Image (tube, helix red, strand yellow):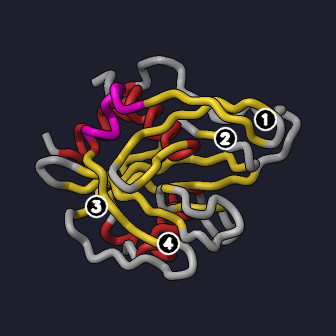
Amino acid sequence: MTLTHRLAAALTAGAGPPPLTGDDMPATEATIAAAVLIAITDRAEPGVILTRRTDTLRRHAGQVAFPGGRVDPEDADTVAAALREAHEEIALSPADVTIIGTTDRFRTGTGYDITPVVGVVPADLPLIPAEAEVAAVFEVPLAFLLDPTNHHAGTGEWQGRMRRFYEIPWPDHRIWGATAGIIVNLSHRLATR
């Protein structure tokens, strides 16, 4: 069975613990629709493409993230938004992505309602970070990210409230917050197959 078929079967299984939904924002607060691409490399030991945002950005500066961002009015849907953002941020051609589907949405304390889009990409594509937004592009083994022993729960104060989050250690990078929460959800979903 190919990587694409294994991922598709796991995403449609729908079992496992309830997903993390993200920050506990009041339901009355408006959110901004966003999408990210979980780009999984098609190799014997699959990896996940992540970025580190530049330190000069207004929001989420220096953080590790999936390629992605807000859904624009001209985007047909969240899949189109994730593909557009990945192309803009790391020069990943939409033609190189085999879309598997979407997975559990995640809300951030900064008001984003993120739809993660899972896709498979060929290994070793020449990815070019957009200088204004992306400081680095790197790949982390999928098995490492999905391993629950690497998911560390933490708390911290932000805007006067205590927040819970996950952190996943990776050399020279801190994977935490929404990115780690989305990974934890994906881990739960894929562990059911």
Between 141 and 54, the one lying in front of the other is: 54
State left or right for residue 80 relative to residue 183.
right
Specify the label residue 134 is tagged with.
Answer: 4
Q: Residue at 67% of width from left, 46% of height from top?
A: 113
Circles 2, 1 touching at the beta carbon (< 8 Å):
yes
Q: Nearer the viewer, mark 3 or mark 2?
A: 2
Q: Residue at 40% of width from left, 58% of height from top?
A: 50
Decide whether the magenta segment is chiefly helix, strand or loop.
helix
Specify the label residue 107 is tagged with.
Answer: 2
State left or right for residue 29 relative to residue 131.
right
- Where is 112 relative to 133, above or below? above
* Amino acid beneath label 2: Arg
Give SS at disc 3: strand
Judge the density around disc 1: few (<14), some (14-19), many (≥20) Cα neighbours within 10 Å.
some
Q: Earlier in the sequence, mark 3 or mark 2?
A: 2
* Amino acid beneath label 4: Val
Q: Nearer the viewer, mark 3 or mark 4?
A: 4
Circles 3, 4 touching at the beta carbon (< 8 Å):
no
**Distance of mark 1 from mark 4, alpha carbons?**
28 Å
Name the residue beneath numbered marker 3.
121
On the image, the x and y values in percent for residue 109 come to 73, 43
Q: Residue at 55% of width from left, 62% of height from top?
A: 62
State left or right for residue 100 relative to residue 75.
left
State left or right for residue 158 relative to residue 51.
right
Q: Residue at 45% of width from left, 30% of height from top?
A: 152
**Distance of mark 3 from mark 4, alpha carbons?**
19 Å
The part of the chain drawn in magenta is: 143-151
